[in-house]
């Protein structure tokens, strides 16, 4: 078993913005101005949807190489339906997360449709982001209070 810990750090920077650091990368998550944010970066749910596409793209390329499939291009569109009354607290009965997620993938390849379906099934199974959606993952959250 070769387990590696993947770490990110985040710091709230005021308003609805959060600065994220991952290795040598730094970026912001925020809300749109319409949602009361500063629009310094995409919203967390948008990054989440992008993570699905990014992971499938990376794993899809790896699996295609292993299966001897030539991929000329892959284009992903991810979408999710969310009821803002849930996470805003307006309606505690409403699910705060995405109600549904869809992934549309356009693949340019010489491979037959049946082979591409097999490829996609393997890529989906090996995609860590989708694995965390398909299978419950423990998520303990600890808080350290900084007292004056």
Image: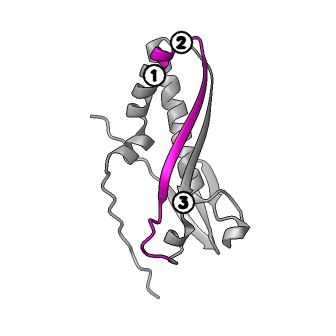
Front residue of this view, candidates 4 and 125: 125
Quadrant location of residue 124? Answer: top left
> x, y percentage for residue 29?
62, 60
**Residue ranking furthest to the bottom:** 148
Residue behind mark 3:
82
Residue behind mark 2:
111
Front residue of this view, candidates 59 and 113: 113
Q: Is residue 66 left or right of residue 51?
A: left
Q: Is residue 131 left or right of residue 55?
A: left
Q: Which comes sooner in the sequence, label 1 or label 3?
A: 3
Q: Is residue 107 left or right of residue 38?
A: left
Task: Tell me the quarter of the image containing the N terminus.
Answer: top left
Q: Is residue 133 above or below residue 121?
A: below
Quadrant location of residue 73? Answer: top right
Q: Secondary structure at mark 1?
A: helix
Q: Is residue 94 rendered magenta in the image?
A: yes
Q: Which comes sooner in the sequence, label 2 or label 1?
A: 2
Query: In the image, which residues are magenta?
Result: 91-117
Residue at image point 71% right, 62% down = 40
Q: Is residue 47 above or below residue 84?
A: above
Q: CA distance from mark 2 to mark 3?
A: 36 Å
Q: Is residue 134 above or below residue 105?
A: below
> x, y percentage for residue 115?
46, 15
Residue behind mark 1:
117
């Amino acid at each position: 078993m070769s387990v590696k810990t993947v770490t990110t750090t985040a710091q709230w920077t005021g308003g609805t913005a959060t600065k994220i650091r991952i290795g040598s990368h730094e970026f912001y998550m925020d809300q749109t101005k319409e949602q009361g944010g500063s629009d310094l970066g995409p919203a967390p749910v948008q990054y989440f949807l992008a993570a699905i596409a990014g992971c499938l793209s990376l794993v899809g390329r790896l699996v295609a190489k292993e299966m001897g499939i030539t991929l000329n291009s892959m284009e992903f569109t991810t979408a999710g339906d969310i009821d803002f009354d849930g996470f805003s607290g307006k309606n505690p009965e409403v699910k705060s997360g995405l109600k549904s997620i869809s992934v549309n993938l356009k693949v340019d390849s010489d491979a037959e449709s049946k082979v591409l379906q097999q490829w996609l099934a393997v890529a989906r199974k090996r995609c860590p982001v989708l694995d965390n959606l398909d299978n419950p993952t423990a998520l303990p959250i600890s808080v350290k209070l900084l007292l004056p």
